[in-house]
Amino acid sequence: MFLKKKMNRFTEDCLDIRSSISEATLLEIKKKIDDADAVLVGIGAGMSTSAGLTYSGERFDKYFNDFKEKYGITDMYSGGFYPFETLEEYWGWWSRHIYYNRYDIKAGEPYLKLLSLIKDKNYFVITTNVDHQVQLAGFDKMRLFYTQGDYGLWQCSVPCHNKTYDNEIEVREMIAKQSEMKIPTDLIPKCPVCNAPMTMNLRADSTFVEDEGWNEAKGRYTEFLKKYSDKKIVFLELGVGGNTPVIIKYPFWRMTDKNTDSTYICINKGEAVCPDSIKERSICINYDISTVLEDLHKKHLPDKM
């Protein structure tokens, strides 16, 4: 009933949106986290955007201007679906896409500030991002569920078996040897089992491989939910938009609604919303994530609240 009533439409009177960050709001968030038995963090694309990992504009032009001029591609996301005529050019694109979003990059400041905020708590992170930023920032991998894949993994395109493969060595070689937007033919990755072309381990359709590591992470996430389902828990949602709300946003709303000792905190510039039924236990901030986490990082609670 909760989902049916509240998932399709939102109006101003059912939201608790704060477009400016007051001292009181920061202290309220900090106290909620400090007093919680556990913190479940849900991270979406807006978190990495706040860290500067944009897929369009100046950053796209810097790394993909030749693809833009030849094909009219205007951003990294849509370029990933372009029907390149050859595998040499397909991997010319994808080797750059992987390299500049996964290997030639450091952990973004919002991720580092988030870790400093929750590192001493019983926390778990579920993310739809595939850029490895959570791991780069130093979060415990055993407390992470990366639901949609990882730029650093390949799988068989068929797929003929349920396994993924690290690609760093191969991608770096593709970057070093590509010319005129193409990689050498002998670098095209092939499945070691059936010899079919390899592809990205990204959830785009039913061929996505959920390997042993993925299933183990899912199991740890399920156990975390069971352990803290009726405890004082904070559901901290960062940068989750409307593309895949069934993975993080809707479950967070539903669990908050069910557990009266829980708090829902949403920080997402332009998309900070919550249903009316959990409004009294929600803090929704329509503001840049990086700025809010930086302010929380510097905030110390007074001795008595």
Image (cartoon, rainbow, N blue to C red):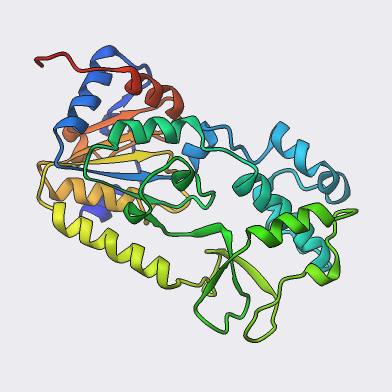
Furthest-bottom residue in view?
Answer: 194
The answer to whether any part of residue 143 appears in the image is yes
Query: Does residue 50 appear to the left or right of 80 in the view shown?
Result: left
Classify residue 197 by image quadrant: bottom right
Q: Residue at x 41, y 66 (%)?
A: 214
| Residue found 65% across the figure and 86% down from its top | 194
Identify which residue, 98 or 54, lies in the foreground: 98
Residue closer to the observer: 62 or 138:
138
Is 14 located above or below residue 218 in the figure? above
**Quadrant in which residue 85 is drawn:** bottom right
Name the side, left or right, on which 165 lies relative to 81.
Answer: left
Give the residue furthest to the front: 169
User: In the rendering, at what x and y percent does residue 231 appear?
Assistant: 10, 47
- Quarter occupied by the N terminus: bottom left
Residue 293 falls left or right of residue 173:
left
Residue 259: percent from left, percent from top:
12, 47
Q: In the displayed structure, would residue 279 be above or below residue 212? A: above
